[in-house]
Amino acid sequence: MSGNIQNRDTFLNKIANQLKRAPKREIEQPTWQYQPQDRVLQDATQDELVTVLQEQCQNIHTNLVITTTANLADALQTVVESFGGRSVVTWKDDRFHKYGLSNLMNEQWPQADIELHVWNYEQPEENIRQAEKANIGITISEITLAESGTAVLFSDKDKGRSVSFLPEKSIILIPKSTIVPRMTQAARWIREKIKSGEKVASCVNFITGPSNSADIEMILVVGVHGPIKATYIVIEDQ
């Protein structure tokens, strides 16, 4: 949005006068002596981050599967079967083909009477309807926080938000290279994209396992307003 700012100087001068100092027109970001947010898992290897993520998944009621691209189709099929199959909704994402899942999704699932709906931005109402009735939603994490067990999903016209929260169960594919220590690195990564002029999703979702709430007397209830079960599939060679 663009427009005119009215009475800015008068407003700022009044605040500065109350603070008994001259108005500040430019602010430099301070360099803090202690920055503990950067010390968390700062020396962890990628394998160690996977271990941290695996341990955290136990705390957030999320199953974690570790596989390779060559075995990903079999691993995904096993999880889909454990979730009851029936119907799946996914993003329209070229990475599914890159990861060798085209045959599974487009041939094996129809033969096994597993209905597949791929997000189509030209059919918004149908997308929502299919996501509401789907048993399983499958997405891909852009960046993954080991400390909290959080997958970060970027929405766009081909990657609807509904895929991650309307189906009864959720499967999130996690390329191993996307795993970072914590929120610090994710926020910095997104900020650098914005600074470089790269287009960033208008909606960034931070998803930590299945839906849950502990609002009432700190008693955790899982599966209250979204997927009741979740599985992360870490792809080691991606």
Image: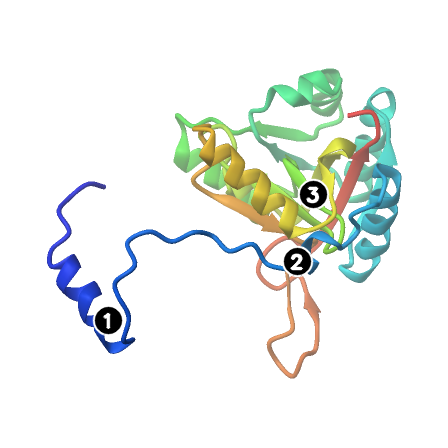
- The residue to which callout 1 is attached is 15
Badges 1 and 3: C-beta atoms under 8 Å apart?
A: no
SS at mark 3 in the image: strand
Q: CA distance from mark 1 to mark 3?
A: 42 Å
* Nearer-N-terminus badge (3/2): 2
Q: Position of residue 233 (x, y in %)?
A: 79, 38
Q: Position of residue 20 (x, y in %)?
A: 27, 76
Q: CA distance from mark 1 to mark 2?
A: 30 Å
Closer to the eye: label 1 or 3:
1
SS at mark 2 in the image: loop
Question: In the image, is 58 to the left or to the right of 182?
Answer: right
Q: CA distance from mark 3 to mark 2?
A: 21 Å
Figure check: 105 above or below 193: above
SS at mark 1 in the image: helix
Mark 2 surroundings within 10 Å by alpha-carbon count, few (fewer than 14), some (14 through 19), many (20 or more): few
Q: From this viewpoint, is residue 154 visible?
A: no
- Seen from the viewer's position, the closer of residues 228 and 152 is 152
Badges 1 and 2: C-beta atoms under 8 Å apart?
A: no
Query: Hey, what amino acid is under mark 2?
Result: Gln
Figure check: 40 above or below 17: above
Q: Residue 35's mark?
A: 2
Query: Hey, what amino acid is under mark 3?
Result: Thr
- The residue to which callout 3 is attached is 144
Query: Hey, what amino acid is under mark 1?
Result: Ile
- Seen from the viewer's position, the closer of residues 196 and 109 is 196
User: Residue 31's image quarter?
Assistant: bottom right
- Seen from the viewer's position, the closer of residues 184 and 230 is 184
Q: Position of residue 197 (x, y in %)?
A: 43, 28
* Nearer-N-terminus badge (1/3): 1
Q: Residue furthest bottom?
A: 217
